[in-house]
């Protein structure tokens, strides 16, 4: 399956990149970055550092994307991801090193346009693991190419739960207008919300299974997960370990049977004083609307549960 990954690395984004590069059945055809966990120049540099460390094919270069949300003031999440977006991670080349994969000169939107323009319909799946600014811009600039997208799988939102406000999840909170534009697109969409990602906890037993002493890559991953674990313990009180949010998107692509879920209508709250960025999920089918994927329909497959053991088997196989 051919995949374009749009991300804001970011610790768990790094794991999504790793899985996208090394999971059998996935061909990563492009990678773009966006503002979010850190400023856009840092998420772009981090993607270049990770592509080197994860031995990505030489032709893969990160496409830099939107430096800010469509309408709102940008945010960064220093508490969770550190000063540069990959706090505490050892074994990556420095951002200014010649080893770091240089950015592709094409903007994220233009890179995705080029890939889709030469693809067959339903050939490319798009994954977003950060704010959806790039994909919303792409859809607004090249609407004729949107129907060629096989599906969009995104980590974001929560059903009745938030993490960076009482009701808003961080990726959606960063750019609610972009998320609403994307949810109205007439293509299949799969939401991996907090309710599901909070079950994919990387525990100390998983850390032992990772065995950092075996290889430099395992050491790098252990430092990444160690930092992430401390951030989640300190900020959210997660004592068992951190949730691997973004990595679940790639697991969905290759093994959707690990998930259960339902087609539902999802909108984003854009105006609430206390609730901006909330994913408003019509769990009772209150709206009684049709089954189209666009604005008037049950526009999203909202995942509800994860086979956690199956997910970690896939993770460790990678
Ligand atoms: C999401 O926000 C970021 O902190 C993570 O990278 C993930 O994409 C979780 O809310
Ligand atoms: Ca992310």
Image (tube, rainbow, N blue to C red):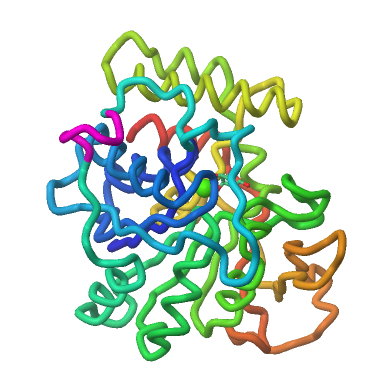
Residue 266 or residue 182, whichever sits in front:
182
| Observer able to see residue 260 | no
Within the magenta stretch, is there residue 178? Answer: no
Residue 31 or residue 209, whichever sits in front:
31
Image spot of residue 241 (x, y percent): 62, 24
The residue that appears at 23% across and 75% down in the rendered structure is 114
Q: Is residue 188 left or right of residue 52?
A: right
Image spot of residue 290 (x, y percent): 69, 89
Picture quadrant where residue 289 is located: bottom right
Q: Is residue 288 left or right of residue 192?
A: right
Q: Which segment did they paint magenta?
A: 94-100
Image spot of residue 38 (x, y percent): 51, 44
Image spot of residue 105 (x, y percent): 22, 62
Residue 99 or residue 148, whichever sits in front:
99
Residue 278 vertical placement versus 311 (above, below): below
The quadrant of the image that shows the C terminus is top left
Q: Magenta segment, principal secondary structure?
A: loop
The residue that appears at 37% across and 20% down in the rendered structure is 90
Within the magenta stretch, is there residue 96? Answer: yes
Residue 149 vertical placement versus 248 (above, below): below
């Amino acid at each position: 399956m051919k995949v374009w990954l749009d991300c804001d690395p970011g610790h768990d984004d790094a794991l999504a990149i790793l899985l996208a590069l090394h999971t059998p059945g996935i061909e990563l055809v492009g990678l773009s970055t966006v503002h979010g966990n850190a400023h856009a120049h840092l998420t772009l540099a981090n993607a270049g550092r990770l592509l080197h460390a994860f031995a990505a094919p030489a032709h893969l270069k990160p496409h830099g994307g939107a430096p800010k949300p469509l309408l709102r003031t940008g945010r960064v999440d220093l508490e969770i991801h550190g000063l540069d977006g990959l706090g505490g991670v050892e074994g990556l080349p420095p951002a200014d090193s010649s080893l770091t994969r240089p950015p592709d000169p094409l903007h994220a939107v233009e890179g995705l346009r080029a890939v889709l323009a030469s693809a067959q319909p339903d050939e490319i799946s798009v994954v977003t693991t950060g704010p959806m600014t790039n994909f919303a811009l792409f859809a607004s600039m090249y609407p004729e190419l949107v129907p060629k997208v096989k599906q969009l799988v995104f980590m974001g939102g929560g059903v009745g739960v938030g993490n960076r406000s009482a009701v808003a999840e961080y990726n959606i909170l960063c750019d609610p207008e972009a998320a609403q534009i994307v949810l109205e697109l007439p293509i299949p969409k799969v939401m991996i919300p907090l309710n599901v990602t909070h079950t994919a906890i990387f525990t100390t037993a998983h850390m032992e299974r990772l065995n950092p002493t075996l290889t430099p890559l395992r050491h790098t991953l252990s430092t990444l997960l160690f930092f992430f674990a401390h951030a989640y313990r300190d900020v959210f009180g997660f004592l068992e370990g951190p949730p691997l949010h973004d990595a679940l998107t790639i697991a969905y692509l290759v093994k959707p049977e690990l998930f259960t879920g339902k087609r539902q209508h999802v909108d984003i709250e854009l105006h609430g004083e206390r609730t901006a960025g909330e994913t408003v999920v019509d769990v009772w089918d209150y709206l009684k609307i049709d089954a189209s994927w666009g604005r008037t329909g049950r526009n999203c497959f909202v995942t509800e549960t994860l086979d956690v053991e199956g997910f970690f088997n896939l993770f460790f196989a990678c």
